[in-house]
Amino acid sequence: MPPASAARKILRRLHDVMAGKAAAQAKLNQVVKIAADELGSEVASIYLLRDGVLELFATFGLAQTAVHVTKLSMGQGLVGNIAARREPLSLAEAKAHPDFAYRPETGEDDFHSFCGVPIVRREAAIGVLAVQHLEPRDYTEIEIEGLQTVAMVLSELIHSAGLVDDAQAMRMRAANSGPLRMNGLKLVDGLARGVAVFHQPRVVVEHTVADDVDVERTRLVEAFGRMRAQIDTMMGQAEFVAGTDHHEILETYKMFAYDEGWSRRINDAIETGLTAEAAVESVQSRNRKRMRSIDDPYLRERLTDLDDLSNRLLRTLSGQLSTAAQLGLQSDAILIARNLGPAELLEYDKRHLQGVVLEEGSLTAHVIIVARAMGVPVLGRVDQLFAQVNDGDELIVDAGNGALLVRPTAATIKSYQAMRVLKARQAEQWERVRDLPAISKDGRQIALYMNAGLLDDAASIALAGADGIGLFRTEFQFLVSATLPRRERQQALYQGVLAAAGDKPVVFRTVDIGGDKAVPYLAGGEEDENPAMGWRALRLALGRTGLMKVQARALLEAAAGRTLSVMFPMVSEPWEFAEARALMEAQRERLAAAGRAVPTDVQYGAMIEVPALIEQLDVLLPMTDFVSIGTNDLTQFLFAADRANPRLADRYDWLSPAILRVIRRVVCAAAQHDVPVTVCGEMGGRPLEALALIALGVDRLSITPAGIGPIKAMIRVATLAPLADMMLGWLAAPGVNIRAELLSAAKRQGLSF
Ligand code: PEP
Ligand code: MG
């Protein structure tokens, strides 16, 4: 019999069983009969997971008295082995296998060959389907796949009859998959524990046997059409070009999406009588099997891409398009994604989101800045993440040590708890200096402000021990909104922030949208090929003055009766600053003329993050009340190295002479013009880097709230003058390894990092 028609016949018979009115046990009895019939085997049996053990639930060919009597634990015997490894096993001589466990009550003495496949639901084994033959024989690929198809249908039957508890199966799977330690790059420091939740949840196929093959064929064609269109759009969209790796992945997606071979294999599976979803799943599980046997990392990666794409196709087919954020987190969760946009992360419920693990990711990408603001630890660049972690696995993220602990043992959980206690003790030490000023031993005072972007952050100024907010990224509100936030909403946020800050200063930065902070409602017009260097930030604001005027009014009215400090992002030439300032001043005059309350004073600042502006500081500085160095963008533009590209993430050192000399130039020029300088990039939040900035003459840092405690504690025990002298010497001497020199000088003072 040709294989496709054999499969079709089995599925037709299973379809009738599923549609029938018989009780669950009777249906299982019918299924084993069909499996034995169609595979020409003397025995077919179903084992299901109950109370943590695999119990014989139905058999054709073995003693009926063994049903509900014969039991095997996970990993025990051939059946337990299949369930534990979630892989098929076929043997010409079953008894010769070291794991063979003899069960006399079944009367299986006469049978030689054995073939079993796991019955899987939500990536957990909930049972095993096995056939046995009297004669020693080998099983063909096609026979094994046929059995897997029956197992897939069985999974649906078992679930709809409520025969196995899903949660119990997931726990068993976790216990059997064993613990694993994976390495990654610390993107946001911290320690977290929770269960794995995929940002794009895996689809569970609920309906496996087709009622009408033609309908399924059409559904597949339509789903392919929609998915290809989505990928084409994504390829063109600036926000998805954030990392170049991402682009490469999309190229691969595109190749697979248009691959005739893949769609043909799915169509062949539909021809046998599966629903379109079950057909995709069945081809996908074959692909996963191949994935496990391939060593070549490049090929493995491509197959992971195909796996990801299969899931996308399943989502398109089943209409289950929601992200885990939209579905809502139910308990403490560690979010798993290839990469995320800042807006996507902000959609998650902060109460349950404990940590994030990414397959990609880089230190200064905006999503990381958002995560830092949310206080969520992030581990990035974890290779093979999707192949090794399952939905619902218990995870510990130890970002500080660059580790992801998958399915940790009781001992690991204990040491995690001990580590948390230690961290809490360290936090207590920082707490002791929280309300004290950051004054060095030799009397130099450094102002430590915090970066913020959410209303909640503003509320934590006191908790962090910050002197105020040195950078409030107003675009966060735009990123979390589905539509352009209206003036009233903007104003309410700014008022809330100022109220929370009390008498501490707040520097609002006007919207920095574009680059990897794309918002769909502002897209329009032509796409940027290089979004980071494109129509973003102040360029966009000066081009769409309506947007800027609304924000100006919201800021001015929110700060009525007090000082408003506002700065503009991505200033490249002094005239841009002048124009932005004039625009705000015009709004202030209009408001005053209309009798509205306005700020008592407005302080205007410029972000220094485009190298060209540094060549014109003599023109810029006389116009500004303050400046703030954005080292994230400045580094990106100075080195021509995309800040969101993971491959460049640690290629350039923040303590390289190139950066430190540029910053020193700004510090000196600002001092001449008596203009205060703050550094507000991520660099300043790392203790050694902060020390370098302070040694360069920077007296104000605006950093991540979590960085304030350790940096304040460091400053209070440091003697800064000699470090500043040494720094000047290192900058003047070519070829010095400043990181190494500074580290050893700091250690000589007893500072620890
Ligand atoms: C910077 O570029 O350093 C900065 C602080 O701004 P953002 O990270 O928001 O671009
Ligand atoms: Mg910037």
Image (cartoon, grey):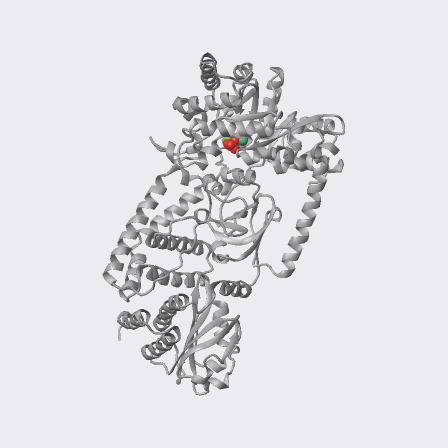
Q: Which quadrant of the view contains residue 159?
A: bottom left
Marker count (numbered): 0
Could you tell me if residue 638 is visible in this image?
no
Q: Which residue lies at the image location 52% right of the left edge and 17% below the top edge? A: 620
In the visual, does 740 lie left or right of 324?
right
In the visual, does 236 lie left or right of 296?
left
The one of 32 and 22 positioned closer to us in this rendering: 22
Q: Which residue lies at the image location 43% right of the left edge and 87% below the top edge? A: 110
Q: Position of residue 106 (x, y in %)?
A: 46, 84
Q: Which quadrant of the view contains residue 34?
A: bottom left
Q: Position of residue 379 (x, y in %)?
A: 55, 47
- The single residue placed furthest to the left in the displayed view is 214
In the visual, does 116 lie left or right of 216?
right
In the visual, does 563 lie left or right of 243?
right
Residue 96 vertical position relative to residue 549 in the rendered view, above or below: below
Residue 28 vertical position relative to residue 607 in the rendered view, above or below: below
The one of 640 and 258 positioned closer to us in this rendering: 258
Quarter of the image where the N terminus is located: bottom left
Quarter of the image where the C terminus is located: top right
Residue 406 vertical position relative to residue 526 in the rendered view, above or below: below
Q: Which residue lies at the image location 26% right of the left edge and 71% below the top edge? A: 5
The one of 593 and 729 positioned closer to us in this rendering: 593
Could you tell me if residue 560 is visible in this image?
yes
Q: Position of residue 78 (x, y in %)?
A: 49, 76
- The single residue placed furthest to the top in the displayed view is 593
Q: Position of residue 135 (x, y in %)?
A: 39, 85
